[in-house]
Image (spheres, rainbow, N blue to C red):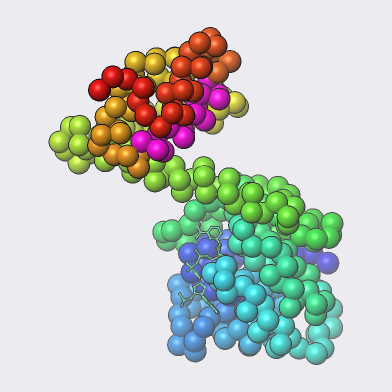
């Protein structure tokens, strides 16, 4: 059996679901339905029949649940209740997919208990704008399943949509998702603080513009270097104790919350830079950053 024999239904034509729909169609896979909440719900894919979840069970045999994480188990349950007692002759064993980065494959248990193959495909990308199949091209995609043949099916499907599949154990999904959040979402929060400080310093509101070349070069160095330590520059990496002291003096006065973030992240930077510094520099920086005070006379 191959994925070409499946009749797909994407349930939840939202940000990810619409992109998946575009990807399935572009890959010339058969899409027989779009699953929606209410009878009058529409999407950009009005040429594909829009059906309620209970009807989706009949209209397809491969369901991609692109609903919010908290809805996956409930939608899987409703689908499971509506599965047809008999499968059409020659139909492949049904298949269900969800795309939560954190959620276990067991969220699809109501379906696996009914003999449906289950797997997770999580594209490691953010989808916010207009859906387009090309948004999936080259995107790393975590594949999670409990059986080897389901992992292989997930890899085949992800590759067919142009993504770069890699395997992820179900019990590692929290750690995996944490990595994505630290690397992406928290970076945005940090850059927002950097913009605020830059706007304050220059008196204009073009902070991100001023920071853009620095940011792009840092990302380029980080992604090309292989080891994050290669991309690390700045006062901690140089052991410039006076500069760190000056930053802390300003932050402790003006922005105690950011001062805590600065100390915590500078200690992480120090762990990366330590092999390049002498023992005295490391000790002084550790005291300065760990002490919770500037260490300088006021
Ligand atoms: N967006 C991303 O960047 C991204 C990336 C990777 C993975 N994901 C994963 O993709 C999944 C969907 O996220 P999203 O960002 O695409 O969410 P979204 O834009 O909010 O879309 C969710 C869709 O599900 C529908 N829906 C909600 N509850 C439903 C229910 N009970 N029955 C049927 N349809 C329902 C929504 O319809 P209404 O709008 O009418 O409520 C909407 O069409 C999540 O598991 C998320 O973790 C998202």
Extreme front residue here?
297
The residue segment tinted magenta is 259-273
> Is residue 270 part of the magenta span, yes or no?
yes
Image quarter (top left, top right, bottom left or bottom right) of the N terminus: bottom right
The picture quadrant where one finds residue 233 is top left
Residue at horizontal 73%, vertical 49%? 167
Residue 250 in sight: yes
Residue at horizontal 41%, vertical 45%? 188
Looking at the image, is 136 positioned above or below residue 223?
Answer: below
Q: Nearer the viewer, residue 194 or 39?
A: 194
Residue 6 in sight: no
List x then y, in percent, for residue 131. 47, 61
Residue at horizontal 55%, vertical 18%? 274
List x then y, in percent, for residue 158. 67, 55
Left or right, residue 86 beside residue 271: right
The picture quadrant where one finds residue 91 is bottom right
Q: Nearer the viewer, residue 206 or 200?
A: 200
Residue at horizontal 53%, vertical 20%? 273
> Is residue 260 part of the magenta span, yes or no?
yes
List x then y, in percent, for residue 220. 48, 29
List x then y, in percent, for residue 170. 73, 56
Q: Nearer the viewer, residue 18 or 258?
A: 258
Extreme left residue here?
203
The picture quadrant where one finds residue 216 is top left
Looking at the image, is 125 positioned above or below residue 81?
Answer: above
Left or right, residue 231 beside residue 118: left
Image quarter (top left, top right, bottom left or bottom right) of the C terminus: top left
Instruction: Identify the main secondary structure in magenta.
Output: helix
């Amino acid at each position: 059996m191959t994925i070409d024999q499946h009749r797909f239904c994407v349930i939840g034509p939202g940000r990810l679901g619409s992109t998946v729909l575009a990807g399935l169609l572009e890959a010339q896979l058969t899409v027989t339905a779009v699953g929606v909440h209410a009878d009058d719900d529409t999407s950009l894919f009005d040429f594909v029949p829009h059906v309620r979840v209970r009807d989706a069970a009949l209209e397809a045999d491969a369901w991609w649940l692109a609903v919010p994480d908290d809805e996956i188990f409930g939608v899987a349950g409703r689908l499971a209740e509506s599965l047809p007692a008999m499968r059409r002759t020659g139909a492949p064993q049904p298949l269900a997919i969800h795309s939560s980065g954190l959620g276990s494959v067991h969220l699809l248990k109501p379906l696996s208990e009914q003999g449906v193959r289950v797997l997770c495909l999580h594209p490691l990308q953010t989808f916010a704008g207009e859906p387009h199949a090309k948004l999936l091209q080259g995107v790393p995609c975590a594949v999670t399943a409990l059986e080897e043949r389901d992992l292989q099916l997930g890899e085949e499907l992800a590759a067919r949509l142009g993504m770069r599949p890699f395997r992820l154990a179900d019990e590692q999904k929290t750690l995996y998702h944490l990595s994505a959040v630290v690397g992406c979402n928290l970076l945005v929060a940090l850059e927002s603080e950097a913009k605020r400080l830059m706007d304050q310093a220059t008196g204009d509101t073009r902070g991100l513009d001023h920071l853009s070349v620095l940011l792009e070069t840092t990302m380029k160095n980080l992604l090309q270097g292989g080891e994050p330590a290669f991309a690390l520059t700045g006062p901690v990496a140089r052991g410039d104790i006076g500069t760190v002291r000056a930053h802390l003096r300003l932050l402790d006065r003006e922005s105690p919350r950011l001062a805590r973030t600065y100390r915590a992240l500078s200690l992480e930077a120090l762990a990366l830079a330590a092999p390049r510094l002498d023992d005295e520099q490391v000790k002084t920086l550790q005291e300065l950053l760990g002490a919770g005070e500037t260490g300088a006379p006021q």
